[in-house]
Image (tube, rainbow, N blue to C red):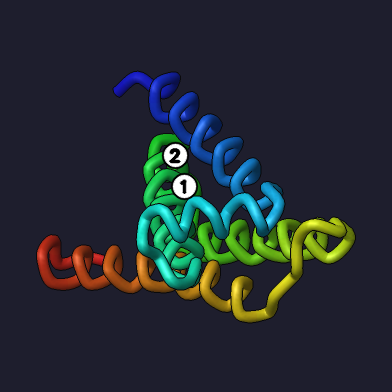
Amino acid sequence: MKKTPIITTFSLYVLVLLGLFLVPSERLKVVYDLMGITGDGLFHFISFLILSLFLHSILRMYYVHKPFSWIITISIVLSLGIETIQYFLPTRDASIIDLILHVSGALTYVLIACIDRIYLKGQL
């Protein structure tokens, strides 16, 4: 399996994600209104669910021991970093709810992956 495409895709995804998390709130509200979205909670949850999928793929490629622990740790650190930066930006608001949604997305992915490994493949 070639490692470059997944790492490139992951890197681009993280850059887009960070860009979206740093865009001024007023601009995002306009986009949400156009799309008919009332809140951004689902975006926070799904974005880290997808991030966890990428992380798991990369960690498995490099045979990292305990990839699920790494997924949770990286998600927490990235979430704390994003919310800390947003705290200091005048155009954004840091939120503990967003942090919880980020980590919940990662935990959901880990739960799904564990269920897959236990029931479908008979291993953990």
Report if residue 54 is visible in the image: yes
Check disc 1 and report the residue beneath it: 55
Q: Nearer the viewer, residue 47 or 24?
A: 24
Q: From mark 2 to mark 1, how far is it between C-alphas?
A: 5 Å
Quarter holding the N terminus is top left
Q: Residue at x 36, y 62 (%)?
A: 36
Asked if the residues shown at circle 2 and circle 1 are in contact, with their CB atoms under 8 angstroms apart, the answer is: yes
Residue 103 x, y percent position in the rendering:
54, 71
Residue 107 x, y percent position in the rendering:
44, 72
Side of 95 where 85 appears, left or right: right
Q: Nearer the viewer, residue 100 or 20?
A: 20
Residue 58 is marked as: 2
Quarter holding the C terminus is bottom left
Report if residue 67 is visible in the image: no
Q: Residue at x 50, y 37 (%)?
A: 13
Secondary element at image label 1: helix
Residue 12 is marked as: none
> Toward which corner of the image does residue 26 lie, by quadrant?
bottom right
- Mark 2 packing: few (<14 Cα in 10 Å), some, or many (20+)? some
Secondary element at image label 2: helix
In the image, is residue 38 above or below residue 2? Answer: below
Side of 86 where 57 appears, left or right: left
Q: Residue at x 54, y 67 (%)?
A: 102
Q: Nearer the viewer, residue 51 or 120?
A: 51
In the image, what residue type sits under mark 1? Leu
- Mark 1 packing: few (<14 Cα in 10 Å), some, or many (20+)? many
In the image, what residue type sits under mark 2? Ile
Residue 34 x, y percent position in the rendering:
41, 53
